[in-house]
C-alpha cells in the first residue's frame, strides 16, 4: 500500500513523545506554531518565550532559541527580547492562568504598546500543571479543585474573554480566537497563527491568537468527551473568530 | 585634567550606562531616581538604544531579563519599593545566568517609607533579595565619580559572571552633584555572549535559557556551579581604607554614610583621636579580608549604618575570630550629618 | 583649603541657582565641590536651601550640620541656620528682608550685611538679589575669584536667558563692591 503524506512534519518540531496527557491539545498548538514558522521561513530567526504552566517545556519540543519567563511575565520578557533583537521573530506561548490571571498587566500593556511580538494563548479553562484549580477563564458552574461546587458568578465573577479585551487595545494588529477540536477548526487555527506571525513579520503591531483547548485530566473527562465539551460549552461562551485585523480595518 | 562635568549622581549613572554601550533601558517612575529614566528617555534613542517605560517594576525587570537573554547590555533602575517588585525577575536572572544591571537608589522604609536616603536594603541586596539561593554582585558608590565608574564596571562584571549586578546608592547619591570626569570604558560590547545568548538558532540546536531543573540531580549540579561562580566573585571585592594604619578604631561605613563618616573621622583626627575608616565599595563580595587583616592588627571596629544594623553582621563575620564590632545606627527618616557620628565614635574609642 | 556653606531662602529666591553657580565656579577653579539641595521633609516650612562644599582634597560629607558660612536670604532661614553656624563663621545676610537685630548672638560670628533686594532694585531687577548676595559672599570669603563666578554664569543660566548674563554679572559685581566698599 502506498503511503500518501497529507502534511509534512516540520523540522523544528522535535521528534519525541511529549509529557502532555492523552487528549491534551497543546501538542496540536505546538505543531501549528511549528508549521507557521516553517511556512514563513523564519525558524532560524525566531526566539520563543516560554511561560509557567504545562507548556513551560515548550523548548523540549520546538528546536528554537528560548528563554523561560517567570509566571505571567512572558509578554514583558518578549518586549525585552524584541527591543534587543528587533530583527527576531518573537513569540510567547502562555496558558490562561499565566496570561489572564497573574500576567494580566503584562499582556495588556504589551498589546497596548503594539510590541511587534506574537502571543499564542492556550485557554483550557483551568490551571493544568498545578492540579486543576480555578482559572480566570473557568466557565460558570465548572467544577475545579478550588471551586468544587462549580464556579459561581457572585463569588468568583465571570470568565474573562481575553481575545475581546486584546482586540480593543490600540496596539493590536491582529487578534483571533480559534479551536482545534475539529479538522476544520484546526485548519482555521493554522491560518490564524500564520496570520499572526505574518503581521509581526510585516511590522504591523501586536498579534494574538487564543486557542481553545482541552484538559481531559483536570476536566475529569475522556479525550473524546473533552473534545466534545469544547464545542458544547466553550465555544458558546468564547466565540471563535477574528476580533481585530488591521489589514481588514484599513480596507474599510 | 580632562573636562569635568558637574552631575547629579542619577545623571552620572545614566550617562555612564550610555558610555558603557547600554542598548536597552526599562524603567518605571519612582522617587528618588527619576532623573535616570528622564535622561535616558531622550538620550538613549539618540544613540540607537531602546527606552521603554514599563507598566510596573515587575515588567521592567522582566524586560531586562528578555534583553539580557539576547546578550545585550541592558539596565533598569528604581528605588526600594520598586526593587522589591523586581526581585522575582532578579531571582530568575540569577537562576538563568543572565547579565543585567539594576540600580537601586535606596529610600526610607519599611513600606512606602519616605523619599529620603536609607541603607535599609542592605540585606535584600547582599542576600540575593528574591526567593532561592543566589547572590548578585553589589556595588556601592560613595561619590558621583564613583557612581559613574562603578556603572561602567557593573556592565563588565555582569557579563564576566553572567549574573545580575546591583548598583546600590541612596537618595543622597542620586540627588547630590559633583564633578565627574567621564571615563571611556575599554569594552562596550560583549562578543563572548554570542556563545550563549539568543540570536535565533542558525545551523545549531536551539538554546534554552532557563532556571527550571527538574531532572534528577540537575538542580544540584546547577547550584554547585553557581556556588563556584559566587566563590570566584570574591576576587572582585573592593574597599577604600582611610587613615587606618595607626588607628585604634576603624569605622566601617558604606556609600553616602561612608563619606559622611569620613568627615567625622577627619575632624576627630584633627583633635588627636586615632580613628580610621574602611568604606566597602563592593557589598557582595564583602571586603572581608581587609577587615580581618585590620582585626589581626589589633584594631577595634565600629560599624555605622543608616538602618537598624545590617552590614554590621558582615563586619562581625569578617572579624569574628579576633574581635567584634560595635554598631551605631542612624535611622532612616533623619538626614545624618558628620556631627551625628562624633559621640558614637568617641564612645567606641572609650572616651 | 576647605569651605562649606548653606544657602537658604524662600522658594523662588534663587538659592538653588546660586548654590549651583558657586559649585560650578569651584569646579572651574580646579577645586573639589559638592552641591546638594535639601531634600525631604525639610523642604517644607518656609525655606529652600542647599549645601555647597569647596575643598582642595576629596570631600567627605556633602551634608553639613554646622557650616562655616551661610548665605541667608530671608527671616525663617536665619532662625533655622544661624544657631548652627560655627564660631567665627561668615554670615551673609540679606538685610533688605532681615534686620541685623534678628541675628541671635551676632558677636560670635562675622556678619556681612548686604541689602540684596535694594541693590538689585537699583540695578533694575529685584529678582537678581540672589546674585548680589553671592557676589557679597565671594568678596567676603574669597573662596573663588569673582571673575570665575562670572565666567560660570552660562553653566547655570539656560540658553533662553543668556541675554541676561551681563545683568547677572553686574549684580554679582555690585554685591562684591558693597562688601569691599563697606
Image (spheres, grey):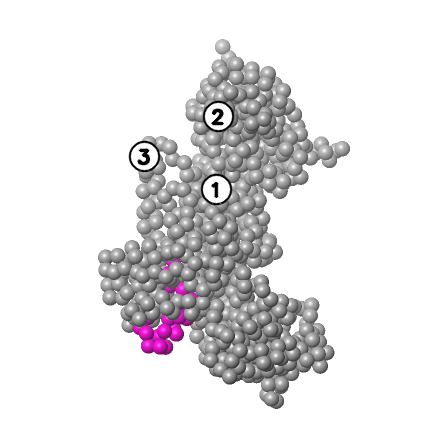
Circle 2 marks a residue in which chain?
Answer: A
Residue at x 43%, y 53% (from the top left corner): B121
Magenta highlight range = B258-282
Q: Residues within 10 Å of mark 2 (few under 14, many from 20)?
A: few
Q: Is residue A103 above or below residue B64?
A: above
Left or right of C106? Residue B265 is left
Is residue B269 in view from this perspective?
A: yes
Report the residue that reaches farthest toward the bottom: C181
Residue at x 57%, y 39% (from the top left corner): A105
Q: Is residue A70 above or below residue C103?
A: above
Of marks 1 and 2, the one in the foreground: 2
* Of the image marks 3 and 1, the number of the one nearer the N terminus: 1
Residue at x 62%, y 42% (from the top left corner): A113
Question: Quadrant location of residue B300?
Answer: bottom left
Q: Is residue B44 magenta?
A: no
Residue at x 47%, y 61% (from the top left corner): B334
Q: Are marks 1 and 2 in contact (CB under 8 Å)?
A: no
Say what secondary structure mark 2 lies in. loop
Circle 1 marks a residue in which chain?
Answer: B
Q: Residues within 10 Å of mark 3 (few under 14, many from 20)?
A: few
Residue B314: give x, y in percent of width and height.
Answer: 33, 55
Left or right of B335? Residue C152 is right
Q: Is residue A151 above or below residue A90?
A: above
Residue B281: give x, y in percent of width and height.
Answer: 39, 60
Spatial separation of the CA atoms under disc 1 and disc 2: 39 Å
Is residue C7 in view from this perspective?
A: no
Which residue is more in the foreground, C59 or B46?
A: C59
Q: Residues within 10 Å of mark 1 (few under 14, many from 20)?
A: many
Q: Which residue position is annotated with label 1?
A: B198
Q: Which residue position is annotated with label 3?
A: B217
Q: Which residue position is annotated with label 2?
A: A146
Residue A46: give x, y in percent of width and height.
Answer: 53, 37
Amino acid at each position: 500500500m502506498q503511503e500518501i503524506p497529507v502534511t509534512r512534519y516540520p523540522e523544528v518540531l522535535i521528534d519525541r513523545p511529549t509529557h502532555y496527557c492523552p487528549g491534551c491539545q497543546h501538542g496540536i498548538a505546538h505543531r501549528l506554531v511549528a508549521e507557521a514558522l516553517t511556512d514563513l521561513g523564519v525558524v532560524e530567526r525566531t526566539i520563543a518565550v516560554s511561560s509557567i504552566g504545562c507548556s513551560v517545556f515548550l523548548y523540549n519540543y520546538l528546536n528554537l532559541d528560548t528563554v523561560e519567563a517567570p509566571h505571567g511575565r512572558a509578554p514583558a520578557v518578549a518586549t525585552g527580547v524584541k527591543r534587543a533583537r528587533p530583527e527576531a521573530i518573537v513569540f510567547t506561548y502562555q496558558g490562561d492562568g499565566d496570561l489572564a490571571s497573574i500576567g494580566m498587566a503584562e499582556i495588556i500593556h504589551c498589546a497596548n504598546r503594539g510590541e511587534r511580538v506574537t502571543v499564542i494563548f492556550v485557554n483550557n479553562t483551568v490551571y493544568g500543571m498545578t492540579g486543576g484549580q480555578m482559572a480566570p477563564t473557568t466557565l460558570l458552574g465548572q467544577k475545579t479543585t478550588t471551586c468544587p461546587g462549580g464556579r459561581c458568578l457572585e463569588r468568583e465573577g465571570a470568565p474573562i474573554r481575553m481575545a475581546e479585551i486584546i482586540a480593543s487595545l490600540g496596539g493590536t494588529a491582529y487578534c483571533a480566537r480559534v479551536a482545534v477540536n475539529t479538522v476544520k477548526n484546526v485548519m482555521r487555527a493554522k491560518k490564524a497563527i500564520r496570520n499572526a506571525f505574518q503581521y509581526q513579520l510585516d511590522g504591523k503591531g501586536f498579534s494574538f491568537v487564543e486557542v481553545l483547548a482541552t484538559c481531559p485530566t483536570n476536566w475529569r473527562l475522556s479525550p473524546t468527551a473533552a473534545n466534545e465539551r469544547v464545542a458544547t460549552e466553550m465555544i458558546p461562551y468564547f466565540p471563535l473568530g477574528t476580533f481585530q485585523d488591521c489589514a481588514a480595518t484599513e480596507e474599510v | 585634567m580632562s573636562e569635568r562635568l558637574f552631575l547629579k549622581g542619577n545623571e552620572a549613572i545614566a550617562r555612564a550606562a550610555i558610555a558603557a554601550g547600554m542598548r536597552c533601558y526599562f524603567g518605571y517612575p519612582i522617587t528618588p531616581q527619576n532623573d535616570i529614566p528622564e535622561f535616558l528617555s531622550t538620550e538613549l534613542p539618540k544613540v540607537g538604544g531602546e527606552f521603554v517605560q514599563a507598566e510596573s517594576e515587575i515588567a521592567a525587570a522582566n524586560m531586562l531579563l528578555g534583553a539580557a537573554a539576547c546578550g545585550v547590555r541592558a539596565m533598569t533602575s528604581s528605588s526600594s519599593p520598586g526593587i522589591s517588585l523586581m526581585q522575582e525577575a532578579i531571582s530568575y536572572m540569577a537562576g538563568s545566568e543572565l547579565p543585567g544591571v539594576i540600580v537601586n537608589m535606596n529610600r526610607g522604609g519599611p513600606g512606602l517609607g519616605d523619599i529620603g536616603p536609607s541603607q535599609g536594603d542592605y540585606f535584600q541586596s547582599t542576600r540575593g533579595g528574591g526567593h532561592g539561593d543566589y547572590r548578585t554582585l553589589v556595588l556601592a558608590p560613595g561619590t558621583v565619580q564613583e557612581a559613574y565608574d562603578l556603572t561602567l564596571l557593573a556592565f563588565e562584571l555582569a557579563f564576566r559572571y553572567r549574573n545580575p549586578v546591583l548598583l546600590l546608592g541612596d537618595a543622597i547619591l542620586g540627588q547630590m552633584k559633583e564633578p565627574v570626569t567621564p571615563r571611556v570604558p575599554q569594552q562596550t560590547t560583549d562578543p563572548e555572549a554570542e556563545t550563549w545568548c539568543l540570536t535565533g538558532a542558525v545551523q545549531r540546536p536551539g538554546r534554552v535559557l532557563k532556571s527550571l531543573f527538574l531532572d534528577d540531580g540537575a538542580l544540584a549540579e546547577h547550584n554547585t556551579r553557581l556556588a563556584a561562580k559566587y566563590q570566584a566573585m570574591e576576587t572582585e571585592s573592593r574597599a577604600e581604607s582611610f587613615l587606618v594604619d595607626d588607628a585604634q578604631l576603624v569605622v566601617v561605613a558604606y556609600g553616602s554614610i561612608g563619606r559622611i563618616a569620613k568627615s567625622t573621622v577627619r575632624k576627630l583626627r584633627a583633635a588627636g583621636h586615632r580613628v580610621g575608616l574602611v568604606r566597602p565599595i563592593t557589598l557582595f563580595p564583602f571586603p572581608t579580608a581587609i577587615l580581618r587583616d585590620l582585626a589581626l592588627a589589633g584594631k577595634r571596629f565600629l560599624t555605622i549604618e543608616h538602618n537598624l544594623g545590617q552590614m554590621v553582621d558582615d563586619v562581625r563575620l569578617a572579624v569574628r575570630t579576633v574581635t567584634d564590632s560595635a554598631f551605631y545606627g542612624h535611622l532612616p527618616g533623619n538626614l545624618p550629618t558628620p556631627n551625628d557620628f562624633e559621640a558614637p565614635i568617641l564612645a567606641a574609642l572609650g572616651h | 583649603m576647605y569651605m562649606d556653606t548653606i544657602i537658604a531662602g524662600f522658594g523662588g529666591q534663587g538659592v538653588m541657582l546660586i548654590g549651583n553657580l558657586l559649585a560650578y565656579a569651584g569646579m572651574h577653579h580646579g577645586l573639589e565641590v559638592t552641591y546638594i539641595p535639601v531634600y525631604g521633609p525639610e523642604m517644607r516650612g518656609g525655606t529652600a536651601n542647599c549645601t555647597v562644599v569647596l575643598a582642595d582634597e576629596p570631600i567627605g560629607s556633602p551634608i553639613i550640620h554646622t557650616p562655616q558660612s551661610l548665605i541667608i536670604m530671608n527671616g525663617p532661614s536665619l532662625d533655622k541656620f544661624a544657631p548652627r553656624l560655627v564660631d567665627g563663621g561668615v554670615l551673609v545676610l540679606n538685610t533688605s528682608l532681615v534686620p541685623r537685630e534678628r541675628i541671635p548672638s551676632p558677636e560670635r560670628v562675622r556678619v556681612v550685611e548686604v541689602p540684596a533686594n535694594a541693590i538689585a532694585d537699583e540695578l533694575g531687577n529685584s529678582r537678581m538679589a540672589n546674585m548680589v548676595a553671592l557676589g557679597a559672599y565671594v568678596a567676603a570669603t574669597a573662596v573663588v575669584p569673582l571673575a570665575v563666578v562670572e565666567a560660570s554664569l552660562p553653566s547655570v543660566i539656560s540658553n533662553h536667558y543668556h541675554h541676561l548674563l551681563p545683568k547677572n554679572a553686574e549684580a554679582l559685581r555690585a554685591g562684591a563692591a558693597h562688601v569691599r566698599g563697606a
